Amino acid sequence: MDEKNLQGESSKSAGGWAAVAAELRRAIDGGKHAPGSRLPGERALSEQFGVSRVTVRRAIAELEGEGLLRVARGSGAYVRADMPVRFQLGDKVRFSKNLTATDANLTRKVVSAKEVRATADIAARLNLQPGEAVLDMCVVAYADALPVSVVMRSCSAKRFPGLAEKFTATGSFTAALKDYGVMDYWRRSTDITARMPTEAEARLLQQSRLVPVLAYAGEDIDADGTVISCQIGCFASERVVVTV
């Protein structure tokens, strides 16, 4: 390596992780990386700044310590949202009205849907017989690109055939349920507790299994008082504030 290259390497090392952290900080403050968005991977950042991945990792750790980034193992580094998502808990549970976030695009996605036999617990919640067919839908809610909740929504497969497809088409359970004659519904009860996430929940929420979640379970009823669905899921505790 010639003297010029040696000087370049020395200068690059002198700047090091602090220089990379400063550049990323300016990009975040300038809006290049929006709240909730994922940073480019270590390899891409390494090539962008012309430094080693170890240096990039150290810079990201610095910004995580400052509270600017959230690092999810196996997923990447995310810009922390300025404000947490707020969930208004009441007798009516409507995603678009109950879940609010400043300048965030709120969406939901059915990540899996399958017909299964009701366990004793689910059957009791839905007022069905154990073994009856139920539709299980795993739904993840996002504030921009950041997942804020994951829930397993279960209902009678006989009463609501094809509900997952109708929800995907409409983007709203309220709208989808009208095709089955359910013009309105209410939350009968909701139980909330704190616990550690399962491996699947941590993966879907893109968070560490060492960070607690706000777990909840509840049932929705129609105008006749008949249970139409039960929901067992959790909020990412660092991203959601529950207001009663």
Image (spheres, grey):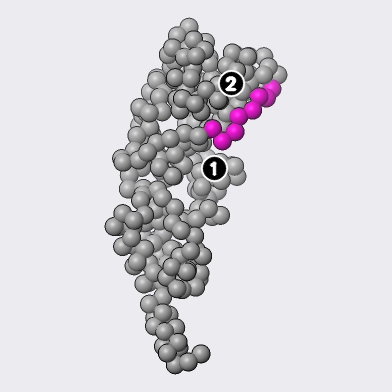
Mark 2 surroundings: few (<14), some (14-19) or many (≥20) residues within 10 A: few
The quadrant holding residue 101 is top left
Q: Position of residue 155 (x, y in %)?
A: 58, 20
Can residue 158 be seen from the camera position used here? yes
The magenta segment is: 110-117
215 over 226 or under it: above or below: below
Q: Which residue is mark 2?
A: 162
Give the camera-side residue of 9 and 216: 9
For the residues labelled 2 and 1, the Cα–Cα distance comes to 24 Å
Give the camera-side residue of 106 and 236: 106
86 over 128 or under it: above or below: below
Can residue 120 be seen from the camera position used here? no
Dot 2 or dot 1, earlier in sequence: 2
Disc 1 is placed on an element classified as helix
Q: Position of residue 98 (x, y in %)?
A: 37, 28
Q: Position of residue 54 (x, y in %)?
A: 50, 71
> What type is the residue that disc 2 sits on?
Gly
Q: Which residue is mark 1?
A: 204
Q: Residue at x 51, y 43 (%)?
A: 205
Disc 2, disc 1: CB below 8 Å? no
> What type is the residue that disc 1 sits on?
Leu
Farthest residue, direction top? 224
